Image (cartoon, rainbow, N blue to C red):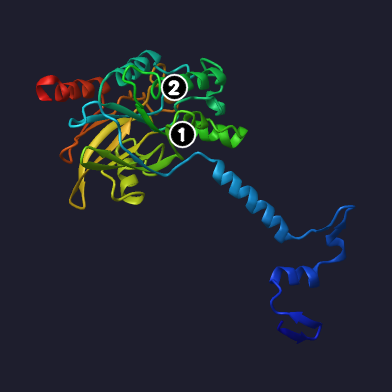
């Protein structure tokens, strides 16, 4: 064994550095004697424990930032419609529950239709400004979403998973930050893929691949240039994306544009919190714009057709998939 001499004595050079530091540098007050063992109190041991808990924390989170999805379409050689639904705010006094119910029924019952959500499916009332604008308790809000998720993944007339992914929103993230309750875990029970507020989705439709960047919110918000945040998402987050979709501002719009010689889509999906709009009007924002944004994706050519009205998009999809077109 190789040893070296120092003014303080002989040192085994094969001895790990941290063991050597503990042996030479630990002060008497940093040592705690217990009946069972001697405990050395030092920052390295604290880091060991903190890293262990950090690893457990990271492993326990259900989020994925990058997804690859292949919807199970009834008519595999025909286009599908992807509903990009957002800002339901289930539980709010301002949500249009009749319209949300109608759109969910359309998604559930129409072949070749699938859905992804972009956050704030529930309101939860964690913000002081909307705390007293809740139509029902948080428990009922969560229960409603759980049953919708169950129906759109396990028990529906189409016998397939319709709700493909869900993105965390600022309302549920605030719930997590203030209470430690991770609302999005409800989706894990139904194999709905969960995005942490932003994400990159690679979707295979027939022999085509579509890249979809989504976010609940993103910088570049503008009430004049409504699609700017979605375009900034493509520019700064995923420049390969065919589609950029950003929610949060309760605005509805789409824009086709070209970037690097490639057709892109920028989408703002609107909201279902459109009834009274007291919160928005009191702040001079104007009325919210209704949800229902969707895009038809073709399986045999790289073609995207966007819609702001879900029913309109589904009617066109029905035309594309009706028997004489099969």
Residue positioned most to the right: 35
Residue found 42% across the figure and 18% down from its top: 95
The numbered dot on residue 150 is 2
Quarter of the image for residue 2 reads bottom right
Residue positioned most to the left: 324
Residue that badge 1 annotates:
169
Quarter of the image for residue 205 reads top left
What secondary structure is found at the residue carrying circle 1?
Answer: loop
**Quarter containing the C terminus:** top left
Residue found 41% across the figure and 27% down from its top: 87
Assess disc 2: are there few (<14), some (14-19) or many (≥20) residues with their C-alpha within 10 Å of its C-alpha.
many
Residue found 35% across the figure and 51% down from its top: 236
* Residue 51 image offset from top left, x and y in percent: 63, 53
Q: Number of marks in the image?
A: 2
* Residue 131 image offset from top left, x and y in percent: 56, 23
From what the image shows, is residue 140 above or below residue 231? Answer: above
Which mark is nearer the camera, 2 or 1?
2
* Residue 203 image offset from top left, x and y in percent: 29, 40
Side (left or right) of 152 relative to 6: left
Quick one: 275 or 307, which is closer to the camera? 307
Q: Which of marks 2 and 1 is nearer the N terminus?
A: 2
What secondary structure is found at the residue carrying circle 2?
Answer: helix
Spatial distance from mark 2 to mark 1, Cα to Cα? Answer: 20 Å
Assess disc 1: are there few (<14), some (14-19) or many (≥20) residues with their C-alpha within 10 Å of its C-alpha.
many
The numbered dot on residue 179 is none
**Quarter containing the N terminus:** bottom right
Quick one: 147 or 197, which is closer to the camera? 147
Quarter of the image for residue 310 reads top left
């Amino acid at each position: 064994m190789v040893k070296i001499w120092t003014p303080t004595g002989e040192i085994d050079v094969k001895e790990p550095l941290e063991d050597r530091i503990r042996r030479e540098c630990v002060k008497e007050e940093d040592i705690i004697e217990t009946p069972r063992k001697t405990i050395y109190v030092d920052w390295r041991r604290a880091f060991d424990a903190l890293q262990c808990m950090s690893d457990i924390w990271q492993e326990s989170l259900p989020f994925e930032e990058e997804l690859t999805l292949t919807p199970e379409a009834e008519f595999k050689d025909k286009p599908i419609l992807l509903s990009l639904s957002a800002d339901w705010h289930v539980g709010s006094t301002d949500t249009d529950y009749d319209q949300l119910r109608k759109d969910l029924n359309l998604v559930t019952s129409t072949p070749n239709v699938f859905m992804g959500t972009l956050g704030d499916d529930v309101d939860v009332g964690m913000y002081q400004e909307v705390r007293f604008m809740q139509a029902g308790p948080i428990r009922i809000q969560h229960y409603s979403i759980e049953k919708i998720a169950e129906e759109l993944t396990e028990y529906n007339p189409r016998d397939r998973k319709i709700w493909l992914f869900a993105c965390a929103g600022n309302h549920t993230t605030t719930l997590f930050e203030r209470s430690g309750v991770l609302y999005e875990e409800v989706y894990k029970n139904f194999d709905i893929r969960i995005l942490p507020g932003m994400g990159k989705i690679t979707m295979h439709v027939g022999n085509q691949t579509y890249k979809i960047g989504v976010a609940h919110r993103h910088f570049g918000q503008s009430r004049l240039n409504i699609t700017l945040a979605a375009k900034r998402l493509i520019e700064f987050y995923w420049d390969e994306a065919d589609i950029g979709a950003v929610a949060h501002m309760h605005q509805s719009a789409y824009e086709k544009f070209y970037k690097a010689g490639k057709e892109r889509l920028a989408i703002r999906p609107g909201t279902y919190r459109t009834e009274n709009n007291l919160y928005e009007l009191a702040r001079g924002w104007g009325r919210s714009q209704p949800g229902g944004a969707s895009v038809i994706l073709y399986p045999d050519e790289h073609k995207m057709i966007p819609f702001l009205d879900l029913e309109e998009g589904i009617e066109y999809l029905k035309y594309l998939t009706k028997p004489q077109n099969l």
